[in-house]
Image (spheres, rainbow, N blue to C red):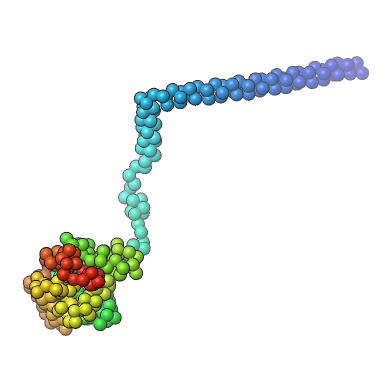
Amino acid sequence: MVFSPLISAASRARTASVQSVAVFLRDMGHGLLEVSHNTLALIGLMLAAVLLFAAGRADVRHEAEAWTLGWLQARQDARELPALPADLLAAELSEPDAIARATASDPKELSRQQAAVAQWLAHRYKVAPEPVSRLVQEAWSVGQKANLDPTLILAIMAVESSFNPFAQSAVGAQGLMQVMTKVHNDKYEAFGGNHAAFDPVTNLRVGVQVLKECIARAGSLEAGLRFYVGAGNQADDGGYAGKVLSEQSALRLVASGKSVPTRASMTNNAAPASAKPDASPAATEASHPPEQVAMLR
């Protein structure tokens, strides 16, 4: 029992030491917190003073803006990725469903008549046979529904645009069949809007509707073609109807299995209407009543 007072004294000393350390740490923490609060308050006051000073100095404000923009640009440049390797670039650009947007058909899928016409047009107008094959198929399908000879539809496309789906005349006729998009914008609503004028199949379908209206209004095919080109009330259509009918005659011979030269008298007129002064919108409105203008190209 001699050691009992010593143990008790050691325990009290240890407890007093722990309490002293705890008090020291607590006081130091409170002090650091107080210093932090004061420091943040001081920084806030300094920032407010700087902002007030900068707001009153246009030159300082402009320099700050320029520095900020430069810093942001540098950050953007630093984040830009280096050029992708060829394989990664190909992967980034790939789009397996893109073929759904392509206007093309395998010529082998066409009938004998259609294939002969497609190949002849491809050689004559120096265009790929696949997209021409798709247009030939469409002309046959739409022609049957509209009771129009498909070779007539193809002949109009040939004379109007030489099968350039992006053709545009000086008066605003657009696409394969050179339809006046702004005049017939109501017809393009069923296809999503006026930009569909540059979709070859859509332009063909709208052009056939316009052609049917022109023929019905004029009473005959040749007169309807004159209306189609905007020369319905003119004595001369610049030879337009003759060109279309001549092209149609050649296509009929090709469809029947006859051999027709592809280089004979090329009718390479991208937009016949643009070459005729009387086919301009102003002339059209002057020569036809307002209710008839909407039927013209």
Q: Is residue 164 visible?
A: no
Q: Residue at x 17, y 82 (%)?
A: 220
Residue 17 in the figure: left or right of residue 77 = right
Q: Residue at x 20, y 64 (%)?
A: 173
Q: Nearer the viewer, residue 134 or 200?
A: 200
Using the image, determine if residue 234 lies above or below residue 194. below
Using the image, determine if residue 276 lies above or below residue 26. below
> Residue 103 is drawn in which quadrant?
bottom left
Q: Residue at x 88, y 16 (%)?
A: 5
Residue 180: x %, y % from top left: 23, 66
Residue 220 in the figure: left or right of residue 22 = left
> Residue 255 is drawn in which quadrant?
bottom left
Q: Which quadrant of the rendered structure holds the N terminus?
A: top right
Number of marks in the rendered image: 0
Residue 9: x %, y % from top left: 84, 16
Residue 39: x %, y % from top left: 56, 21
Residue 235 in the figure: left or right of residue 177 = left
* Residue farthest right in this picture: 1
> Residue 62 is drawn in which quadrant?
top left
Residue 106: x %, y % from top left: 27, 72
Q: Nearer the viewer, residue 60 or 108?
A: 60
Q: Is residue 98 visible?
A: yes
